[in-house]
Amino acid sequence: MVFERRYYLEQLCRAEGNGMIKVITGIRRCGKSFLLFNLFRQWLLERGVSENHIIQVNLEDRRNKKLRDPDALLRHIDSLMVDGDRYYIMLDEVQMVKEFEDVLNSYLNVPNAEVYVTGSNAKFLSRDIITEFRGRGWEIRIHPLSFAEYYEVVGGEKGEALEMYYRYGGLPAVAQLARAEEKQNYLREIFETVYLRDVLERNRLKNPTGMRELIRILASIMGSSSNARRISNTFKTVGGLDVAPATIAKYIECLQDAFFISEALRYDVRGRKYIGTETKYYFEDIGIRNAILEFRQLEPPHTMENVIYNELCRNGFVVDVGVVGSFRRGEDGQLKRRSLEIDFVVNRHDERLYIQSAYAMPTDDKVNQEQESLLHVDDGFRKVIIAGDRYHSGYNEDGILVVGLYDFLLGKIELWK
């Protein structure tokens, strides 16, 4: 079972020869190494590149521990570059090398060196691309399998495939396991031994119990508005733990740096400004989220929202949560202000989409409820409802584009005008 990851492979192929360091980032086990060492390597070989001009170093491999020393790594690479032809240098999990920025910068002015690196930590990669590489770093962000990538290989009845995707997520290794028990055990194991341990050790956190409880809380409130102070209060109420809001904020930042979760900021549509009081958190892989909760709190509406969010981010869009004010006359005859939420405000350059995620709209009342916030937006950008119970897409009488979930996830409809 091979996932071709064409979307990312095309990005790598287009970047070949651009004179920059190609930095492939993403959560651990999402397929970065396979993309670089297998798919891209095969593409190079098919174009006539000699095997001895492809230098691969897996720095996560214990056998390469000596090469985590920057000078040893430089000597190793230099010893393999024996002529003036182009060499393709591929370094996996480069953040394990001390002073890796100096190593990569050493090859910026080597005309026949084409450098590709992978990493699982935004703190040591994405931010350093800006500060250290001086505009010479080219980031390609990898995500777990989209539903389209998953379904293309797994096939079968769409509803059953989506149910499995909702439950077990899109990590390639999980998709290749046959039995439910194997999938669940793998997800539990990788959370404890890879994701949690990596965050604790990398950031030298001394409160593993607090971090584990925070992750459980975030998994329980997935897609709900919250903030560090409210989560701190939840710690006290549920677990009897006194963890300061500042500590909560620090731990959340560590999880974001590891690409474990993402945050969607709240945006005042009419006021055209961000609201810093609350935010929403989504999981990079829904299967890991479910494993954290022992597959007990399976919530299809929230899961669908998380999957839509991930799909939008996978396409490189900036995604916020929208807030729009409105007035309604109460029973006392007085006008009262309300804040209505738009699930996603999606930005692409100078274009925008407003999107609602609706698990089901069986009645007119439910339709009106889902589109109410959209109807209070008075600009000219397209308004969309992605509906889990619709199999055909089209505009309704209020001018809102209602898109079937499968059409959206399988890329069968163009959302942008």
Image: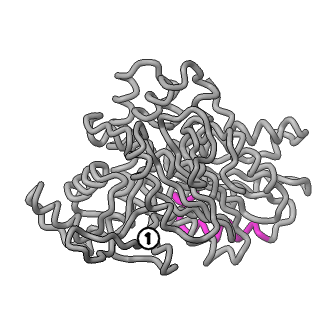
| Residue 211 sits above or below residue 13 on the image | below
Q: Residue 110 location in percent, x, y? A: 82, 66
Residue count near mark 1 (Cα–Cα under 10 Å), binned few <14, some 14–19, many ≥20: some
Residue 258 placement, left or right of 84: left
Q: Which percent across, then down, holds residue 381? A: 63, 65
Percent of width and height locating residue 144: 54, 43
Q: Residue at x 50, y 37 (%)?
A: 171
Q: Which residue is mark 1?
A: 324
Q: Which sits in the foreground, 61 or 348? A: 348
Residue 67 appearing in the image: no
Which stretch did the figure color magenta? 93-108
Q: In the image as oriented, which residue stretches furthest toward the front?
A: 333
Who's the residue at 74% across and 42% down the image?
40
* Relative height, residue 389 to residue 182 (above, below): below
Q: Position of residue 81 (x, y in %)?
A: 81, 54
Residue 4, compared with residue 122, is above or below; it is above
